[in-house]
Amino acid sequence: MSKRLWIKNPLALYTGIDDDAAGGIVVSDARIVELVARGQQPSAPCDEIFDAGEHVVLPGLINTHHHFYQTLTRAYPDALNKELFPWLKSLYGVWAHLDPEMHAQASRLALTELLLSGCTTAADHHYLFPSGMEEAVDVQVEQARAVGIRVMLTRGSMSLGEQDGGLPPQSTVQTEEQILKDSERLIHRYHEHGDGARVQIALAPCSPFSVTTEIMRESAALAERLDVRLHTHLAETLDEEAFCEQRFGMRTVDYLESVGWLSDRTWLAHGIHFNDDEIRRLGAAGVGICHCPSSNMMLASGICRNLELEAAGAPVGLGVDGSASNDGSNLINEVRQGMYLQRLRYGASRVTHFDAYRWATSGSARVLGRDDIGVLAPGKQADLALFRLDELRFSGSHDPLAALLLCGAQQADRVMVGGDWKVIDGSLPDVDLGELVADHRAAARRLAQKAQG
């Protein structure tokens, strides 16, 4: 018989819906089966009870854009204090030396860091496939399964190298045939459809300045045929806008439409420099937008127009972006950053902590095309993040849900994925974090040494 777990009487909780669940949540068979109202008992006996009286409970946070491999080049000297294009050019030559072992260490560390921050689903955009890295996404699947987190792994691509007017070095680009053949292989081998999916694959040509128009069109056709999602960077900087106008004779959203991407199958990373008409068109098409606040601040790219995009009908979620432009993989920190950066655009009274929670949960779920995660409701997957407020930073706080962000939470105390506790008392059982960090640092040193000759 299925066991029932009652997560009882939380200090505070955000469900993402309006139902009263102050009495807690009942979990069974990987799903939420009941919300308990304040002062009430579950409708049937429970086998286990977890007293959440000192915990703030959230739906598992959802990261909709990342680059796991970039954890190896955090605070890299040659890339400091630069805007996007020169930043990329300074790092492409380093990343070109990535090998499978380094990639495994980078992915394991990024996924662990995310999980400890309350993240239960992570999308990664991997587009680097130099010689020897042909099975980079396979490596990520293995690491995600070991950590126990849900993933949307986007098979990225670069086909427009420096010789043809693009930014990446030729050693990192692939042919159209290589890209499409491997994309189809990964979908057939790993992509899971339906509720509770643990591994999903999407197609993700890197950006307009690193792929050809042909690969954009062919990726859209393949995604339609195999029913997977599409992802790319778009409208991150004014330089990108100028590149599109110069190379294609059109703005970014016009280009997106011209290659068959203006649909609810698509989500975009950054999405900063849209005009009013473009926001209307994106919303009407249901294109999702991933807001990456820390990265956008670090590279001084601009501020996403979250509220206008949502009002137009575009789902808006959050992403930590690459660990070389954010220098971290901490999603609860990104929720706080997202709230503060949006307040700079709209004012303090128009952006609340509830908006930030929405972007990190139900908004991000919609961006990834999922309706089984992102809220706490009967029938949804039991993905939960529980935080304690017993650190110095929270002393003197009054509203627990507000304090979690305003006082700067950094780590979850407990994290559940599909009904299984993955983080307990702020740590991952059976994971030696010291060993993980040592191995990862060694990989980062090897990569830097290879890049330096």
Image (cartoon, rainbow, N blue to C red):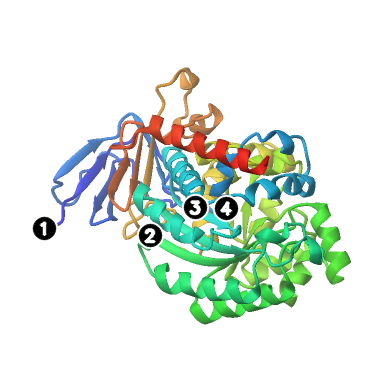
**Residue type, numbered disc 1:** Met
Q: Is residue 371 shown to the viewer in this render?
A: no
C-alpha separation, residue under disc 1 versus residue under disc 3: 43 Å
Would residue 260 appear left or right of 438 to someone viewing this image? right
Q: Which mark is residue 336?
A: none
The residue indicated by pointer 3 is 100
The residue indicated by pointer 4 is 65
How far from the left and from the top, in percent, is residue 74?
A: 61, 37
Instruction: Of the two numbered discs 3 and 4 on the same chain, state the one appearing first in sequence.
Output: 4
What residue sits 48% from the left and 18% below the top?
Answer: 396
C-alpha separation, residue under disc 2 versus residue under disc 1: 24 Å
CA neighbours of label 2 inside 10 A, class few (<14), some (14 to 19), many (20+) = many
Q: Nearer the viewer, residue 17 or 38?
A: 17
**Residue type, numbered disc 4:** His
The residue indicated by pointer 1 is 1
CA neighbours of label 4 inside 10 A, class few (<14), some (14 to 19), many (20+) = many
Q: Nearer the viewer, residue 140 or 298?
A: 140
Locate residue 198: give its quadrant.
Answer: bottom left
How far from the left and from the top, in percent, is residue 291?
A: 63, 50
Q: Which mark is residue 198?
A: 2
Would residue 197 appear left or right of 232 to someone viewing this image? left
Instruction: Of the two numbered discs 2 and 3 on the same chain, state the one appearing first in sequence.
Output: 3
C-alpha separation, residue under disc 3 versus residue under disc 4: 21 Å
User: Which mark's residue is nearer the viewer, 4 or 1?
Assistant: 4
